[in-house]
Amino acid sequence: QVQLVESGGGSVQAGGSMNLSCAASKFNYRNSWMAWFRQAPGKEREWVASIMTNVFTYYADSVKGRFTISQDTAKNTVYLQMTSLKPQATAMYFCAAEDKCGTYENAGTYNFWGQGTQVTVAS
């Protein structure tokens, strides 16, 4: 059974940086999207970034230029480097993976999800 385990969340001041990790087990990353989503209290889950085979990367406009998604295929781990963090980034961040060849920004594409890690950005 595929398992995704996120780590690296916590609290940071606005303007600071934070790195998240997502370790995948029993998952074949080849030709599959892996992604980060986030969900703030009272809001819908929001797509943040996606990556495929450490080659194709896409970002939501709200994070473009400040967040970087990357992948260590040897470790089957996906990372999200976040810089210039804003209070609006406060949310639970979820790692997701899929094996259905869907669209990368659609939450419905992803059939495997981690438990999430909390990111809090203080103003």
Image (cartoon, rainbow, N blue to C red):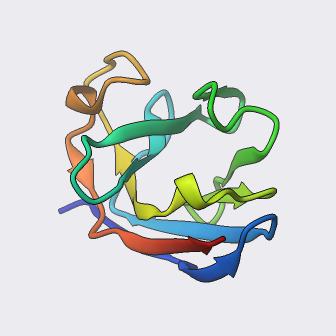
Image point (70%, 48%), residue name: 70
Residue 69: image x %, image y %? 68, 46
- 65, above or below 88, in the image: above
Image point (63%, 25%), residue name: 61
Is residue 18 among what the camera can see? yes
Compare residues 91 and 105 and report the one nearer the observer.
91
In the image as oriented, which residue stretches furthest toward the bottom? 10
Image point (67%, 56%), residue name: 86
Compare residues 31 and 13 and report the one nearer the observer.
13
Image point (21%, 53%), residue name: 42
Residue 41: image x %, image y %? 27, 60
Compare residues 27 and 82 and report the one nearer the observer.
82
Res. 99 image quadrant? top left
- Quadrant of image for the N terminus: bottom left
Residue 18: image x %, image y %? 71, 71
Is residue 5 among what the camera can see? no
**Residue 73 relative to residue 118: left or right:** right
Res. 121 image quadrant? bottom right
- 86, above or below 101, in the image: below
**Residue 46 relative to residue 49: left or right:** left
- 81, above or below 10, in the image: above
Res. 64 image quadrant? top right
- Quadrant of image for the C terminus: bottom right
**Residue 112 relative to residue 97: left or right:** left
